[in-house]
Amino acid sequence: MTTALASLTDCIRPNLEAVERLFHSELQSDLACVNTLVKHVSRFRGKMLRPCLVLLAGKACGELTDAHNVVATVVEMVHMATLVHDDVLDEAELRRKGATINHLRGNEAAVLLGDYLISHSYHLCSSLDSQYASRLIGKTTNEVCEGELLQIDNRNNLDLGEETYVQIITRKTAVLTATCCALGARFAGADEARVSRLELFGLSLGQAFQIQDDILDLIGDVSTVGKTLGSDIEKGKMTLPMIHFLRTAPPEHRTLLRSLLSSADSDKVEKIRNLILPSKSIAYASQKARQLVDRAQNAIADLPDGEARRALDTMAEFCVTRPM
């Protein structure tokens, strides 16, 4: 799937290379200690999903411009900032098979590096003639923070409902992918109806991505996923498989899960994994993610056939086919 995705993004390769250059030039500092941290965090960037969404949405709706490169770089900086801050919140030690900033240099450096990325994203975004992108990205980052705060407020809430869970993942993850697609379409000159459809694509994709991420945190393999797993359980974050299990499992199993979630047992992550795996809760969460991917793909079904639209379809599929 990774190889297929890479080949499908060939149509935006020059723009991705421009984003790469802009990312590094904008974050360049005259302080070696800052450059060292930026270089390290750049390892976390992976497949550059969010810049790809900006560029592919734009390409699917029209022609790409320099503004697309700027917006794609901005959303990547915002995303990287959220990863750095998330690792602090989760006390994570591993991301993309490398040490997190907080593990390597401590929480103070990690928080400040996240702030550095955010401030540079707005500095770069202000270079655009239109304030539309700045205002939308500002609104989006506000919602991301609200989603994180809502999740913190519901830590150890074993009665968390599915509706609130969806609200959390929509704000903390999906609104940014929705904004990427909407901005890509708008800067390509798409009409409001098409911008809205691309926004729905991004929103649905982001929700599916987070559900799958939560599944991987519960049952994934560290060597395959490449980051610290089990952090949702350790931090008292209720995710869709656990919510479903507590709603549908036999009473004695629900009681056992509640007991494990509330305990200080050093092996509770493994015990919870073994409790939930034989149930239907993983399949339920996977089905929800699949439905969201279908909704995403339907939202762009009327786009002209071409490399960009096919790449967007592939990205949606990747959300639910990532290796565990």
Image (cartoon, rainbow, N blue to C red):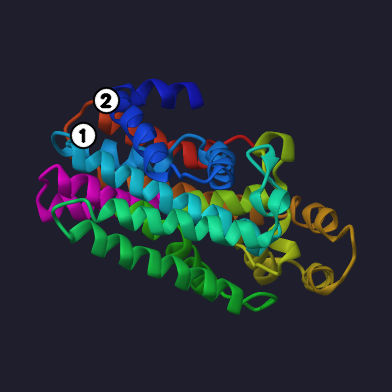
Q: Are marks 1 and 2 in contact (CB under 8 Å)?
A: yes
- Helix, strand or loop for disc 1: helix
Which picture quadrant has residue 220? top right
Q: Is residue 264 left or right of residue 69?
A: right
Q: Is residue 304 positioned above or below 108 on the image?
A: above
Q: Main secondary structure of the magenta part?
A: helix
Note whether residue 86 is visible. Answer: no
- For the residue pair 167 and 109, the one nearer the viewer reads as 109
Disc 1 vs disc 2: which is toward the camera? 1
Q: Which residue is mark 1?
A: 59
What is the crowding at mark 2: few (fewer than 14 residues within 10 Å), some, or many (at least 20)? some
The outermost residue toward the front is 30
Q: Is residue 84 left or right of residue 264?
A: left
Q: Position of residue 174 (x, y in %)?
A: 41, 57
Q: CA distance from mark 1 to mark 2?
A: 9 Å
Say which residue appears at 52% left-offset and 39% top-offset.
42
Comes first in the chain, label 1 or label 2: 1
What is the three-letter code of the residue carrying label 1?
Answer: Lys
- For the residue pair 107 and 291, the one nearer the viewer reads as 107
Was residue 184 drawn as part of the magenta stretch in this picture? yes
Say which residue appears at 58% left-offset and 41% top-offset.
36
- The magenta stretch spans which residues? 180-207
**Quadrant of the rendering where the C terminus is positioned:** top right
Q: Which residue is mark 2?
A: 307
